[in-house]
C-alpha cells in the first residue's frame, strides 16, 4: 500500500471515531448535581452510580451518560440539550415517560454536570 493510500485510510478512520459529548457544563457543579439527582429521586426509575435509591429499571441506566451520543435515544448529547431535557422532558421529546419535575435552570445545570461525570 502506498504512503498516500495509508494517509487517506488514516484520515477516513479518524473521521469514524465516536465523538464524546461535551463533559463540562458552564456553571455546573457535579457534586451539587449528584445531590439534586438524589433529592429528585431519579433513582426510583434509573440505575445511577453514586446515588442512593431503589435503582429502578423503568427508565434506562444512566451509568455511562457522559459517554453516550444521544439523550433519550434521539437527542444529541450536548449540555444545552441535557439541561432543557432535564427541565421539561415531554417538551423536548414528546411521548417520553419521564415527567417534568419543576427542575430550575440552575438545578438542571448542576444535574447535567453530574450526568456528564458518569463515564
Image: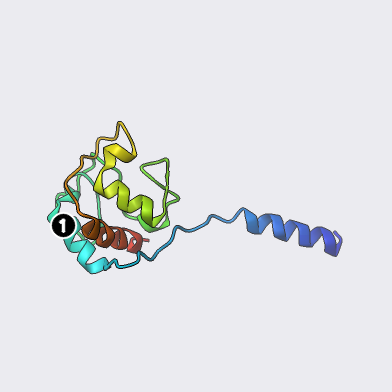
Q: In which quarter of the image is residue 93?
A: top left
**Percent position (x, y) of residue 74?**
42, 40
Residue assigned mark 1: 38
- Looking at the image, residue 6 lies above or below residue 98: below
Q: Residue at x 17, y 59 (%)?
A: 36
| Camera-side residue of 107 and 61 | 107
62 left or right of 3? Answer: left
Q: Residue at x 25, y 43 (%)?
A: 88
**Percent position (x, y) of residue 52?**
15, 58
Q: What element carries label 1?
A: helix
Mark 1 closeness class: few <14, some 14–19, many ≥20 residues within 10 Å: some
Q: Residue at x 17, y 62 (%)?
A: 35
65 left or right of 57? Answer: right
Q: Quadrant of the C terminus?
A: bottom left
Q: Residue at x 70, y 55 (%)?
A: 12
Q: For residue 61, say whether it is visible.
A: no
Q: Residue furthest front?
A: 105
Q: Which residue lies furthest to the right in this view?
A: 2
- Looking at the image, residue 89 lies above or below residue 30: above
4 left or right of 83? Answer: right
Describe the colour scheme in one phrase: rainbow
| Camera-side residue of 71 and 58 | 71
**Percent position (x, y) of residue 28?**
29, 66
| Camera-side residue of 9 and 111 | 111
Amino acid at each position: 500500500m502506498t504512503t498516500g493510500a495509508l494517509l487517506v485510510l488514516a484520515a477516513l478512520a479518524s473521521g469514524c471515531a465516536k465523538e464524546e459529548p461535551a463533559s463540562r457544563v458552564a456553571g455546573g457543579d457535579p457534586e451539587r448535581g449528584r445531590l439534586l439527582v438524589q433529592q429528585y429521586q431519579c433513582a426510583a426509575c434509573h440505575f445511577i452510580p453514586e446515588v442512593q435509591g431503589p435503582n429502578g429499571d423503568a427508565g434506562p441506566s444512566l451509568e455511562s451518560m457522559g459517554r453516550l451520543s444521544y439523550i433519550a435515544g434521539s437527542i444529541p448529547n450536548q449540555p444545552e440539550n441535557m439541561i432543557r431535557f432535564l427541565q421539561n422532558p415531554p417538551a423536548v421529546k414528546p411521548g417520553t415517560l419521564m415527567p417534568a419535575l419543576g427542575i430550575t435552570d440552575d438545578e438542571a445545570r448542576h444535574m447535567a454536570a453530574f450526568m456528564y461525570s458518569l463515564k
